[in-house]
Image (spheres, coloured by chain):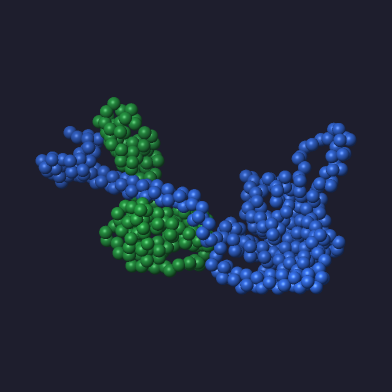
Chain colours: A blue, B green
Amino acid sequence: MMNTDNNIQWFERYLDNSLNAEEVKLFEKRLQEDDAFAHEFEAHVKTINALNIYARRTRIKDRLNTIHNELLNDSKYIKSSTYKLKPQANEYLKPLIAAASLALVISIGTYLAFNIAGIVPTSEKNHYIKLSKDLNDIRNTQYKLQNQIEAVNKKKHPASLCGSGVVISSKGYIITSEHLVKDADSVFIENARFKRLKCAKIYTDPKLDIAILKVEDSSFSGFGILPYTLRPHQMYMGESVYTFGYPKQDIVYGEGYISSVNGYEGDTTSYQVSVPVNPGNSGSPLFDKDGYLAGIIQGKHSENEASAFAFKSYYLKKIINENDSLRAKIKLPQKNYLKYQQKLKQINQLQDYVFLISSY
Amino acid sequence: MKKYNSDEEIIQGIQADDVEALRVLYRRNYHSIVHFVYNNNGDEHDAKDIFQEGILIVYEKLKSDSFQLSCSLRTYLYSVCRKLWLKKLNQRSRYIGKIEDYDEVISLEEDESYFNEETDYQNIKHSLLMLGEPCKTIIEDFYIHRLSMADIAEKFGYTNADNAKNQKYKCLNRLKKIFFSLKDKKVETKTV
C-alpha cells in the first residue's frame, strides 16, 4: 500500500508525464475508485499551483526590484523627475514667475538709473538683526568667570543657540526660524507641559528663514487637538497681535500691532510688527486677537526698537501645500477653538504649544 | 539591445520574456504613479508597492493569451494602479471621496481570477514562513530557484538525491496541511 509520501511521488510523476501508459491507466483508475486518493490528489494540485504562482511572482518581483534599484541609482533619471511639484502649482506659479522677472528687470533698471545719477540708496542691510541669542559675547565673559571660579558644576552642556517655536500639527511638527537650527546637530524643544523633547529637522528654507522640526522622542505620543489654526488670510495694518517667546528660561508674553503689511525692505513674505522682542524671540509665534496663528517672528530692526519682522503664516500654508512630502506628513489643524474666548483664556491655552528651542 | 518604442514592441518583448521590455515599461511609468499616490494621501513607500503590484498585474495579463488591450499601455497601467490605491485607501479608511487624477483613466472590471491568485499567493507565502527550516529553503530551492534534487542534496548534506527527495516530500506534505488550514480559516472569517 502506498503511504502519503509515496502518493506524492506518484502525483509528481503523473503531472510530469513520466509514468508509462500502464501506470497512467492504473493511476487514473484509482482516482476514480478511491475518493480519499482523489481528494489528496486535488489538494496536491492546488498546493503546487499556489507554489507556481508564488514562484512566478517572486521571480518577477525580484526583477522589478532590480529595475527599481537601478532606477534609484541612475542620477540622470532622478534629476529629470520633478514630480514633487503639483502641475497645478506650476501653472499657478507661471504668473508669479512672470511678475518676479518683471520686478527684477525694473529693480535692476532703477538701481542702474540711481547709480548713473550718482544717488546710491543707503543700504538698510546692516540694520537687520537676527534675534537668536548668539551667546558668543556672553560666552567670552563667561569663560573669564569660569577661569576665576574654579569649581564650576557643569551639569548640562550649554546650548549654543536658543529661541522659540510653535506647534503646527498635533503629530509633532514645530515651526521655528532656520537660523536657530542651521548648524545644529541636535535640537531640543522644551516647555512646562510637554517637558524636554528631542527633534529632527525635516525642512529648512534659509531664504525665508523657516525650519520645520519633528519630535523624535520615543515617549512622545502627540500634542493632542490644537486649539488654533493658521490664519487663512493676511493681516491688515493696525490689527493687534500678541506673541510668546523664550528670551529667558520662562515664557514671556508681549503684545503689539501690525505696523506694516510688508517686512524688511518691502519683503512681501513678512509683516513688520510693533511688539517688544528680544534675543530668544526668534521663531516666536504671532497670534491675532481671535487666536489665529498669524506669523513667526524672525528678526528686528537694529535701530528702530519698535519694529520686528514676522514671517506670514499665510505663506507657511503655501509652503506646506506645495511640497508634496510635507503635505503628506503635516496635517494642519482645522478648527480654531479660541475665536470667541477672552484673551486670558486664549493665552492660557496657547502657551502650552510654544516651546523653547535649544540647538547644539 | 532591442529598442522599445511603441506599446506593441513592449508587449511583444514582455511576451518573449525580455527583461529590457519590462525595464522600459517600468521607467516610463514609475513617476506618473508616484506622483499620483503622493498627491492622494500616500508616501514613497506606498507608491513603490502599488506600482510594482500594478506592473505585476499588467505583466501577467500581457502574458495570458486571452487578454486584449483596449487602450494605451500607459493608461491601462495607470488605471490598474489607481484602482489598487483606491482599494488600499479604503482599507485604511483614508479615502476622502476625492481623487486627484493626472492621466486618463479607463474603468476596469473586478478581476475574480486575479483575486483568487492573490489569495493563494498570500496563503502560500504565509505557509512557507510557518513551515520553518530546512523545509522552507528546500521547497524554495526546488520550486523557485529550480535547483535539481542532486544540488539540493549536496547543499543540505544528504547522502544522495533520494534522501533529499524524501525530505522534500515530507516538507511538501506539511506545507499542504498549513496551506489548507489557512485557506479554510480565510473562508470561515469571510462568511462570519
Determine which quarter of the picture holds residue A305. Answer: bottom right
Count the labels in the image. 0
Left or right: A177 with respect to A32? right
Instruction: Depth check: give the residue in front, A321 or A25.
Output: A321
Q: Position of residue B61 (x, y in %)?
A: 32, 58
Q: Residue at x 40, y 58 (%)?
A: B25
**Quarter placement of the N terminus of chain A:** top left
In the image, is B192 to the left or to the right of A219? Answer: left
In this view, the residue in front, A196 or A204, is A204
Camera-side residue of B67 and A332: B67
Residue A207 seen anywhere in this rendered image of the structure? yes
- Which residue corresponds to the image point at 70% horizontal and 55% vertical from the top-left? A178
Residue sitting at x 66%, y 55%: A204
Rendering coords of residue B58 (x, y %): 36, 58
Q: Quadrant of the C terminus of chain A?
A: top right
Residue A130 place in picture, x, y as percent: 78, 56
**Residue B11 percent across, percent down from the top left:** 33, 59
Residue farthest top in this picture? B159
